[in-house]
Amino acid sequence: MDAFFEEGSLVAILTTQPLDRTLDYKAPAGGCFQGAYVEVPLGPRKIMGVVWGPGKGDFDISRVRSVNRVLDVTPMQGELRDFLCRAGDYTLTPMSAMLRLATRAPGLSEAPSLRKIYRLGIGEPDRMTDPRRRVLEVLRDMGGLSLTLGELAEAAGVTSSVIKGLVKQGAVSEEEAPRDTAFARLDPDYGGKALTDDQETAAQVLRAAIASGRYGTTLLKGVTGSGKTEVYLEAVAATLRKGRQALVLLPEIALTAEFLTRVEARFGARPAEWHSGVTMTERRRVWKQVSQGGAQLVVGARSALFLPFRDLGLTIVDEEHDTSYKQEEGVLYNARDMAVLRASIGAGQVVLASATPSLESWANADAGKYRRLSLTSRFGASVMPEMRAIDMRGQDLPSNRWVSPALAAQVRARLEQGEQAMLFINRRGYAPVTICRACGHQVGCPHCDARMVEHRFLQRLVCHQCGETTPKPAACPECHAEDKLAAVGPGVERLAEEAAELFPEARLAVLSSDLFGSARALKDEIEKIARGGADIIIGTQLVAKGHNFPLLTLVGVIDSDLGLQGSDLRAAERTFQLMRQVAGRAGRAEKPGTALMQTYQPEHPVIRAILSGDEENFWKAEAEERRAAGMPPYGRLAAVILSSTEAQEAFDLGNAMARQDAPLRKIGAQIYGPAPAPIARVRGRHRVRLLVKAAKGVALQPALSAWAAQFRLRGELRMAIDIDPQSFF
């Protein structure tokens, strides 16, 4: 039971302000519990905070101000406070920043009230205009969900008067509703499917783990199309029967729509959603209902892990190997690892689901830390695709073409049979480099040491580091020669252009994250393709993430060698995962599928492992290499990224840190660097990196804290410490 503080007693308040400590206040009239959300004065402002414990009283008590009021929301439970503290300690993140992660919902300080909401009505407008049509289309797309006036106006791109006019005619319904209502109850016995023997065995193990009421983590490994989702939805059902809450993390918003449909079919109602595509009004509702128990299941992005669950009994991390679970800006954390940490604190279960697990999860299962369940065959009539390499050294291909004659012939065969084919290349845009044929200048970003990528569909050059965008110039910015700028190398848009020339009768669909203005537009396109609305799908790694295209029988990978270049320690692992995931899109219905990989290195160990399907030997060989080098998961890494508007300032600090390394030498850690980051300037800031390597069992974080504390950051200098880095740009 959390402590209660009587009126006037000292309490420590944690706020989201960038301070390195809690602040002392006097408890308000009526007192307050530990964990209560409160409003406190700070200077002339009123800010939100959480009662973290008793005050320290280490300064003049007469100057301590009182808490203004206790907010009308459920207090933060001890489990979440503990999780934020331990996650902050692990990632070396200030507690104010951790609290910001846990309070990302607007209007928490507002009193509960009614609001006007708008949904589709039963009438028809007397005349249809384009603005009215947009309003009605938005409401139809929401599937019965309601919107506020401002949200509907923004989504439809109209003024509020258009909506009010539709209300008068009954085409739009205006209703008074409580601001934050509970979600419809999910029925665990509503729509269960008959499982295969493989699936039922795995489901029984998960049900037993949930019934135990203890912590545990399970690696659910199954080939693409094996029905992992149906298995872990049975675990969700078991969790709901126990009266506990469940969370499903997905790596991509585009996957959410299809998944929500499956959840609704299984449990008879839609769960709560939490991701960047959800309106701010809905975010506040989800946040409040999660804390009150009015949301049994949340489907969301990585930040959903910081919601104030009343009793989180199960967390599913779907496609657990996906790099998007690592937050690379602000608070640097890996949602997969944080899910395990939170479950260990709250006696919950974690299911890490993937056809191609991360080496970290594989090693933990191999060492017995995680339970391992395997699904070895595809669900129903579908079988795993045949995988073959196309040796590009033997293909007669012009220098400005990327689809080999062998692959083109296979695509034509599929089109003649009325089936779908996919061409995959892991590059967004039209071309990665724009070069001047007169002087050799490569068009770069003015704010970053990165080339501008041509996006021909947008008619612009885009920096993929900072987002800077400019029209493609007619003349070279360096020598001013006109009509000499040339696109070099293929991107997904250039591949689409080539496919249109090779297969003029085919209907093409291009799937790339930058081509869709909203998650809804992307969802609509994916659904259209699944219904047969395209003959050839051309996509980036977006297409590898769990989508199901029943008519797709051929996948052609244009540049299988792309991920094998560079010095990234995870290059082999990521290439293996991506290629296997992409290949797994083929043959997921009755018709068998084929995956063809264009490669100039068919003898490369990773390419051979992908083609043979010998996953266990690949993981064992990769594990042995990492173990011999003392690299993760058999050693520990931390990256230190220094940045400044002045390059020399960042390097001076880096050199000083490399010299004054006594706290790290005490634990036997090694420092590499300083060195310029591979992309040495981003958003106008020069970046310098150091890498710290340590043995597996050492207390790395305290040593890093002591090391970093020796240096004061002045002016424009910034330091970020990334524990367990996933990227090294």
Image (spheres, rainbow, N blue to C red):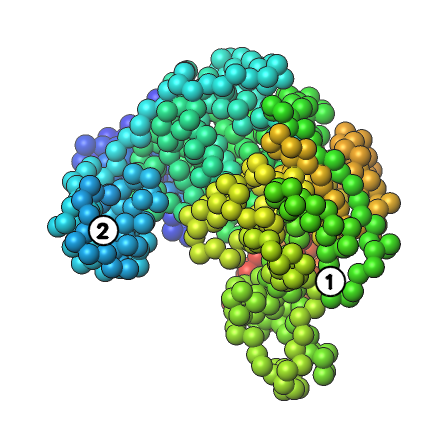
Mark 2 burial class by Cα count in 10 Å: few <14, some 14-19, many 20+: some
Residue 620 spot, x, y in % from top left: 79, 31
The local secondary structure at tag 2 comes to helix
Residue 336 spot, x, y in % from top left: 57, 36
Q: Residue at x 39, y 18 (%)?
A: 190
Q: Amino acid at mark 2?
A: Leu
**Which mark is nearer the camera, 1 or 2?**
1
Q: Earlier in the sequence, mark 1 or mark 2?
A: 2
Task: Say if 170 sits above or below 431 in the image.
Answer: above
Q: Is residue 299 visible?
A: yes
**Image check: 662 left or right of 306?**
right
**Image check: 677 left or right of 114?**
right
The residue singled out by tag 2 in the image is 149
Q: Residue at x 23, y 56 (%)?
A: 128
Quadrant that contains the C terminus? bottom right
- Depth check: 590 or 459 in front? 590
Q: What is the quadrant of residue 186 in the picture?
A: top left
**Image check: 430 left or right of 599?**
left
Q: Residue at x 14, y 49 (%)?
A: 169
Mark 1 burial class by Cα count in 10 Å: few <14, some 14-19, many 20+: few
Task: Say if 277 sits above or below 296 in the image.
Answer: below
Query: Can you tell which mark lies on residue 401?
Result: 1
Q: What is the quadrant of residue 177 in the picture?
A: top left
Query: Can you tell which mark lies on residue 519?
Result: none
- Depth check: 239 or 149 in front? 149
Q: Amino acid at mark 1?
A: Arg
Residue 348 spot, x, y in % from top left: 49, 23
Instruction: Work out how far the residue at label 1 is from the one at label 2, CA to CA, in angstroms.
Output: 51 Å
Task: Say if 339 sits above or below 666 in the image.
Answer: above
- Depth check: 541 or 587 in front? 587
